[in-house]
Amino acid sequence: MLIDHVEVLVSSPGRNFVTLRVRTADGLTGYGDATLNGRELAVAAYLQEHVVPLLTGRDAHRIEDTWQYLYRGAYWRRGPVTMAAIAAVDTALWDLKAKVAGLPLYQLLGGRSRDACLVYGHASGNTLPELFDSIRAHLEKGYRALRIQTGLPGMSTVYGVASSPAAAGERYDYEPARATALPVEERWDTRLYLRHLPTVFEAVRAEFGPELPLLHDSHHRLTPIQAASLGKALEPYDLFWLEDVTPAENQEALRLVRRHTTTPLAIGEVFNTIWDYQTLIREQLIDYVRSPVTHAGGITALRRIFDYAAMYQVKSGIHGPTDISPVGLAAALHLGVAIHNFGIQEYMPHTSDTDAVFRPSYRFAGGSLAPGEEPGIGIDYDDVAAARFPYKAAYLPVNRLLDGTVHDW
Ligand code: EZ4
Ligand code: CO
């Protein structure tokens, strides 16, 4: 199964995506996702200039060897650009191997451990009534777990709050990347957030009862002691998880958080290797691993992280915003139905333009996503549709404190 043609596809059906297509001499096609929000062309160039020339003529069956070749062979290790590029190759090779086998990918990963992946949707609102409308709209669609993000009184934009209300149609998802010449700048007030958020969860529990699993993302904005205090304050509302409380480059910071709260913690959407989780998992400082296939070196590498996590009863919570392409989401679902320590899968539906380009075969029903049943990962990229959506530079926002200091976004 020799690789004879590799293409880096960049398109923007609603937002930018970088996709790798690997063709074999006998005419099979495999896909991988290499999208890195706001830095897309860096990965496209890494692939085009430094990886594509290495792939032509290789045996597509040698997934592990290719992974090690690209990881160790570059000498320069880790990092989001490198690991997204390796992820795309790895995913494309798994897609190819499953197509050769004539099986959906999850069969090659050990077969089903469950019927489908429970997902959580994104409910948000600037005010409580808007938030409640968003929760109700999601429940009507069948969601059985929800992330709750809310505006702060007096602040115009806050991470995670959709700009249009729930009823406004298909673009009710939260898309932070904006096609502006410079990144949009947002403002942030940690003390206000810490005071306000528990009142929101109290109101949501009072309105919707104790059963519904609720999640929240602090998006790296707190110090360890602030995170500890928030975790404690939210304990009465029984969160499924509290996400990214601190910028976790410093894994030891989580020791302090953990000593003070039993609120479950999820971390890692910006991590890219197992080493970023070593202390967090071994010392059981977190409960959920957030890495997606797309940013953690592919199915091969993320599977390894999950197997390590399983030793410590840490579960998967794969990142699934719209900046993970349908290729990355499809790969996550095959892995998610196969592993034993599945936790939950994040899900923000893509736009119909995105789905028209990628034609994913996964299906949402009853609050869960099930991977497609045809051979491979279940993606069929439409070049004609993609040509309608050329790349458009877009940036994630930059965050500043009220006095102007740059803060974590
Ligand atoms: O801000 O993927 O949990 N989800 C998130 C996302 C991230 C975006 C950044 O590209 O934190 O919304
Ligand atoms: Co997050």
Image (tube, rainbow, N blue to C red):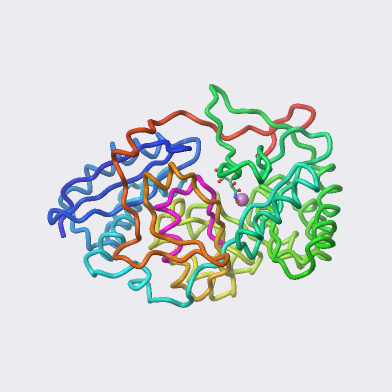
Specify whether 355 is left or right of 283. Answer: left
- Quadrant into which the C terminus falls: top right
Q: Which residues are magenta?
A: 317-334
Residue 296 versus residue 36 in the image, above or below: below
**Nearer-the-camera pick, 227 or 254:** 227
Does 182 appear above or below 150? above
Q: Position of residue 61 (x, y in %)?
A: 22, 63
Is residue 249 in view from this perspective? no
- The residue shown at (50%, 61%) is 364
> As displayed, is residue 364 above or below residue 3?
below
Q: Is residue 329 magenta?
A: yes
Left or right: where does residue 229 sit relative to residue 339?
right
| Point 16% across, 60% down: residue | 1
Q: How many marks?
A: 0
Residue 242 in the image: state x and y as whole percent.
Answer: 70, 58
Is residue 341 visible to the viewer in this orientation of the structure?
yes
144 on left or right of 150: left
Q: Examine the rendered structure and indicate whether residue 25 appears above or below residue 76.
A: below
Query: Residue 312 at x, y = what percent?
Result: 58, 74
Within the magenta stretch, is there residue 213? no
